[in-house]
Amino acid sequence: MKKLYLFIVLLNINLFASAQSPELYRIWHLKSIEYDFGGEIIISEIEPDINPYILFYEDHSFEGFAACTEFNGNAEIITTNGDNYGNITFQNLNLPEIYCENEIFNIIQNDFEIILSETREWLIATNPQTQELELLIGEMFHTYRFTAGEMNTVENSLSQIEIYPNPAFDYIHLKNVKPNSMYKIYNLSGKIVSEGNLNVSNKITINRVPSGVYILKLDDAVLKFIKK
């Protein structure tokens, strides 16, 4: 039932897809989780803010952030109908089992564990209503809808944008970033601990942030740093 339903959804959306779809290898931010039995979770409506994402690399490895923890692994990616549709078999998943403090976070955390297992159908297409580029991943009772990050996000995350010192004590500097970029810093529970716009020196003060590992989300990149 789910496969038939997903095929209809994919077919309808694909009618609006561009003839040449962008590559899968970029960052994708989770927009919503839609359930076959009715209802959906819309990520932008969750409080406190949360930023689940998955980042695919050209060597078929992936990493990301669910609701409370990071994850990583490898994927066997098969494309059909050009480069915009196919199957993904997720392998070697490293997603720690953890109980989140927030109940909705727990649901998303568990859903990520479901989606990142076995073989899933995927489609990249432009949503005709929002004009956003989306990645849809189908599971037996769920459809996960992601929106695309910048095309050069993978490149930026790996080579161009630099964060230093790392580990850091009182502040971090960023190199090769857009002027006045907006930033958000998340702890590993998915809670925003700091946000704002970069100053002219591209320096972020973190002296009031507790020690730990953090996710820094910029307009066009996602990076990790350690606060000592």
Image (tube, rainbow, N blue to C red):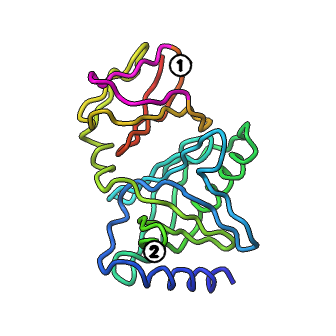
Asked whether 85 falls inside the magenta stretch, the response is no
Other-residue count near label 1 (Cα within 10 Å), few / some / many at <14 / 14–19 / ≥20: some
In the picture shown, does residue 205 fall above or below 125?
Answer: above
User: Residue 16's spot in the image, x, y percent?
Assistant: 42, 80
Q: Residue at horizontal 58%, vertical 72%?
A: 138
Secondary structure, mark 2, is: loop
User: Residue 47's spot in the image, x, y percent?
Assistant: 66, 42
Asked whether 199 falls inside the magenta stretch, the response is yes
Residue 178 image-quadrant placement: top left
Q: Residue at horizontal 43%, vertical 14%?
A: 169
The number of discs equals 2
153 vs 72, nearest the viewer: 153
79 vs 40, nearest the viewer: 40
Q: Is 51 left, or right, of 163 in this rendering?
A: right
At label 1, which amino acid type do we have?
A: Val
Q: Residue 166 carries which label?
A: none
In the picture shown, does residue 167 fall above or below 22?
Answer: above
User: Residue 174's spot in the image, x, y percent?
Assistant: 30, 28
Q: What stretch is highlighted in magenta?
A: 193-207
Residue linked to disc 2? 128
At label 2, which amino acid type do we have?
A: Pro
Q: Residue at horizontal 31%, vertical 33%?
A: 180
Secondary structure, mark 1, is: loop
User: Residue 203's spot in the image, x, y percent?
Assistant: 33, 21
Q: Is 196 left, or right, of 143 in this rendering?
A: left
Residue linked to disc 1? 209
